[in-house]
Image: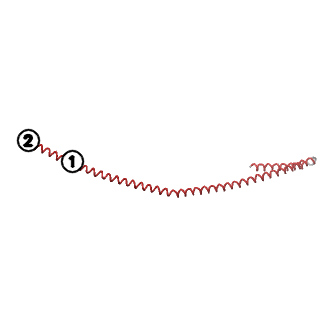
Amino acid sequence: VRSEAQSAESETDSLKAAVREANEESEGLREEIENLTQALENAKADRDKALEEIDDLKAAFDEAEKLAEELAGPKEEALRKELLDTHAREVEELKEELEGLTQANDRLKKMVDDLKESQSAALAKAAAAATAAASAVEEGQDKSGAREAELQAELDKAMSDLKLRENEAGM
């Protein structure tokens, strides 16, 4: 009976020790659960704070984008006006340049016309001189050779004037 009592007492002590160890382990696990629960709450708070910051950033971005669009309108209009003004100024400059070229062209046409008239006059003068020379030759073939040389010189001069004017007109 005694040995049974000792064996029961030893078994009770073993069970008490096992219960103590289980209680200590349970306490350790409870502390770990509390720590994990606290970490989870902290993580949730951090997540909520990050979401708030994201929402704040989205709102700030939307506001900045709206402001940029509002400011872009007047800037685009000013840029468009500047481009139109520049284009109008360039068109006006080109018109002035075209007017100058047209005037220069008109002056050149007048010069060509004047040279043609001068050429016609020189041809008429040369023809008249040639006719006069021919008439003089026919009438006075027996007159002195000096008059013939004089008329030939006049004809040569008229022809050289004509060639000179033709060269000027060819420019």
How many numbered dots are placed on residues in this image?
Answer: 2
> Which residue, given by chain and number where applicable, does mark 1 sit on?
26
> Which residue, given by chain and number where applicable, does mark 2 sit on?
4
Q: How many C-alpha atoms fall within 10 Å of the one at disc 2: few (<14), some, or many (≥20)?
A: few
Q: From the viewer's side, name the closer residue of 144 and 140.
A: 140
Q: Residue at x 21, y 48 (%)?
A: 26
Q: Residue at x 52, y 57 (%)?
A: 73
Which badge, 1 or 2, is on the more N-terminal residue? 2
- Per the image, label 2 sits on a secondary structure element best described as helix
The residue under label 1 is which amino acid type?
A: Ser
Closer mark to the observer between disc 1 and disc 2: 2
Q: Residue at x 8, y 41 (%)?
A: 4
Residue at mark 1 to residue at mark 2: CA–CA distance: 32 Å
Q: How many C-alpha atoms fall within 10 Å of the one at disc 1: few (<14), some, or many (≥20)?
A: few
Q: Position of residue 128 (x, y in %)?
A: 87, 50
The residue under label 2 is which amino acid type?
A: Glu
Q: Position of residue 93 (x, y in %)?
A: 64, 56
Q: Which residue appears farthest toward the front when viewing the image?
A: 1
Q: Position of residue 152 (x, y in %)?
A: 86, 48
